[in-house]
Image (tube, rainbow, N blue to C red):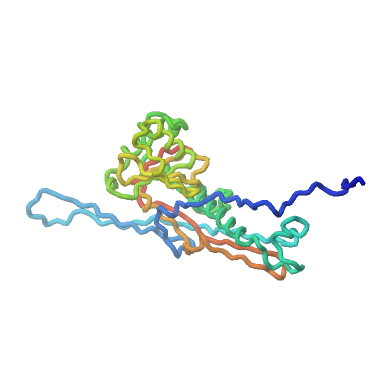
């Protein structure tokens, strides 16, 4: 007897394989900064400083000095993700068998938790890129057209007070190559205001790619003080201490992905404005009986500014 199986497609047990999620993001820049909640549209960062005047008179009768109150505004941009998927589209695929209950009323989905996790994951990544790369008035893939700029535009030579050193050992993109990045960072430290030298939140922010150049530079410079176990890895954030400089951290963030910008300053003087902090990790997922679709909505408001530009140093690379 001969078997004729030409009418059948080759067997592929699609429901036997593991479903691999494309998780791309873990940590967040927000972990390092100050968050100002309750911002609906625009609120100030209220600043207060004193200029103390000292003279050599033994009898002082004339008041001297000043106490100054100033403000720098945070404008937040509404950011919303909304989608609806028809679960009936899965009926013809292996997903109909593996992830839907029997019956024609598909109100539940076995992959709802994985779907939720992926949505939050991707939104967090977009938020970090928004905080760094959003350009005021320009449409972007990070959240449309907004009236706020990201930190790349704020911590730059275009902001009065921000220091852009003129004594870098090299210029251009070679500034952050593994052979030069340590010298670049040392130059930035040398140009940092001594008024913040004792702060414990001084932080270098750079891309993940340039963080790897930094690690390679450390390894090549001296194996004796490079400890690979000192690197904290949380997906979108890499962190380690800067050798021989107490209180200075080096952070690689996906928010600076695709750029060679490196900035240094007190991280807690970055102020992120939002309506409610929990909006970054919570969202709505529901079955809409009217349209027979599974829907999600994620909504936040987000903006950023820095308190004192004069305490920041930038290499000003694109």
Of residues 159 and 231, which is closer to you in this image? 231
Relative height, residue 313 to residue 286 (above, below): above
Q: Quadrant of residue 167?
A: top left
Q: Position of residue 269 (x, y in %)?
A: 37, 52
Q: Which residue is depicted at the point 13% across and 49% down?
A: 55
What is the number of callouts on the image? 0
Q: Position of residue 213 (x, y in %)?
A: 45, 35
- The answer, for residue 200, to whether it is visible in the render is yes
Q: Position of residue 41 (x, y in %)?
A: 49, 61
Q: Quadrant of residue 46?
A: bottom left
Of residues 127 and 58, which is closer to you in this image? 127
Q: Which residue is depicted at the point 68% across and 68% down?
A: 288
Q: Position of residue 248 (x, y in %)?
A: 34, 45
Query: Which residue lies most toward the front here?
Result: 1
Left or right of residue 23: residue 56: left
- The answer, for residue 310, to whether it is visible in the render is no
Left or right of residue 287: residue 158: left
Left or right of residue 121: residue 103: right
Left or right of residue 29: residue 244: left
Q: Which residue is depicted at the point 45% across and 58% down?
A: 273
Query: Which residue lies most toward the left here?
Result: 58
Query: Which residue lies most toward the bottom here?
Result: 289
Of residues 37 and 292, which is closer to you in this image? 292
């Amino acid at each position: 007897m001969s078997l004729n199986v030409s009418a059948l497609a080759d067997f592929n047990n699609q429901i036997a394989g593991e479903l691999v999620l494309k998780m791309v993001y873990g940590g967040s820049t927000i972990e390092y900064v100050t968050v100002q909640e309750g911002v609906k549209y625009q609120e100030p960062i209220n600043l207060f400083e004193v200029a103390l005047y000292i003279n050599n008179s033994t009898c002082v009768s004339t008041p001297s000095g000043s106490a100054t109150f100033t403000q720098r505004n945070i404008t937040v941009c509404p950011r919303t993700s909304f989608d609806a998927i028809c679960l009936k589209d899965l009926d013809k695929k292996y997903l109909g068998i593996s992830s839907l209950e029997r019956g024609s009323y598909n109100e539940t989905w076995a992959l709802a938790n994985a779907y939720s996790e992926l949505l939050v994951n991707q939104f967090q990544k977009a938020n970090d890129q928004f905080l760094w790369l959003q350009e005021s008035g320009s449409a972007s893939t990070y959240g449309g057209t907004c009236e706020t700029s990201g930190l790349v535009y704020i911590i730059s030579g275009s902001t009065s007070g921000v220091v852009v050193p003129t004594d870098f050992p090299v210029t251009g993109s070679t500034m952050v190559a593994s052979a030069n990045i340590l010298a670049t960072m040392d130059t930035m430290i040398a140009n940092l205001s001594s008024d913040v030298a004792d702060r414990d939140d001084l932080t270098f922010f750079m891309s993940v790619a340039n963080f790897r150049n930094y690690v390679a530079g450390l390894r090549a410079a001296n194996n004796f003080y490079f400890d690979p176990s000192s690197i904290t890895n949380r997906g979108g954030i890499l962190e380690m201490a800067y050798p021989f400089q107490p209180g200075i951290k080096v952070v690689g963030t996906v928010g600076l992905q695709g750029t060679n910008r490196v900035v240094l300053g007190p991280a807690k003087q970055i102020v992120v404005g939002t309506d409610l902090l929990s909006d970054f990790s919570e969202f709505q997922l529901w079955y809409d009986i009217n349209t027979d679709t599974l829907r999600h909505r994620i909504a936040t408001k987000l903006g950023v500014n820095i308190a004192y530009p004069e305490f920041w140093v930038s290499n000003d690379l694109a």
